Image (cartoon, rainbow, N blue to C red):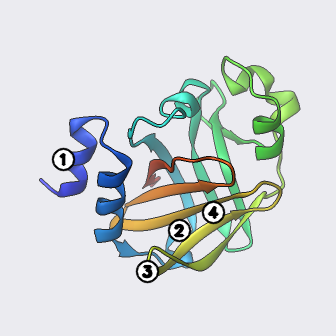
Amino acid sequence: MTAFQHALDQGPITPEKAFALFDALAPVDPDFLIGEWAGEPFATGHPMDGALEATGWRGKRFDSVDAVHPLLFDDGKGGTFAVHPGRFMGKPASGKAVERRAELETDQPAARLRSVLHRGQVTAAMVYDDLPIIDMFRRVDARTVLGVMDMRAMPLPYFFVLRRVS
């Protein structure tokens, strides 16, 4: 069992242990992320742990380095739809995003991929267009990355996992 899988299986770990795991992983080139990715939690005791999943969050889609849909949600019919992050985070509400689909959905990308220096490594990062958020990624394996969200005014990092959709 890998250290990553062990950490995922054991449940919440401290942000310090999550960063130690993150730092041990290989950096990611932005082109590696092109495609659709299913998201899942990586619990560290962050206040956002489980919050996205409770709203029907399903992952991210990277159409190109300049066209990223950072929030995909379950459409209730086996598919997904893209949500504008500013609309979603600007008016947080309980319940499933699909219930607010008419006001949240977008077909326009809302982020870009760039290479950034983060924690001593140059790696792929998703830079949101309209929000002070950058998600950095490290490679677990050919189909899995560990992400960490850096958001201005958020004192703790938020970790998450993305797995490539076939």
Query: Mark 2 highlights which residue?
Result: 33
- Label 4: state its secondary structure: strand
For the question of whether residue 142 can be seen, the reply is no
Question: Label 4: few (<14), some or many (≥20) within 10 Å?
Answer: many
Residue 8 picture quarter: top left
CA distance for labels 1 and 4: 28 Å
Residue 130 location in percent, x, y? 83, 56
**Residue 96 sits above or below residue 4 on the image:** above
Residue nearest the viewer, comparing 24 with 41: 24
- Label 3: state its secondary structure: loop
Q: What is the number of the mark on residue 62?
A: 4
User: Which circle's residue, 4 or 3, is located before the other in the chain?
Assistant: 4
Query: Mark 3 highlights which residue?
Result: 120
**Residue at x-position 74% and y-position 57%:** 132
CA distance for labels 3 and 2: 20 Å
User: Which circle's residue, 2 or 1, is located before the other in the chain?
Assistant: 1
Residue nearest the viewer, comparing 22 with 35: 22
Question: Label 3: few (<14), some or many (≥20) within 10 Å?
Answer: few
**Residue 133 sits above or below residue 76 on the image:** below
Mark 2 against mark 1, which lies toward the viewer? 1
For the question of whether residue 42 can be seen, the reply is yes
Q: What is the number of the mark on residue 6?
A: 1
**Residue at x-position 52% and y-position 32%:** 47
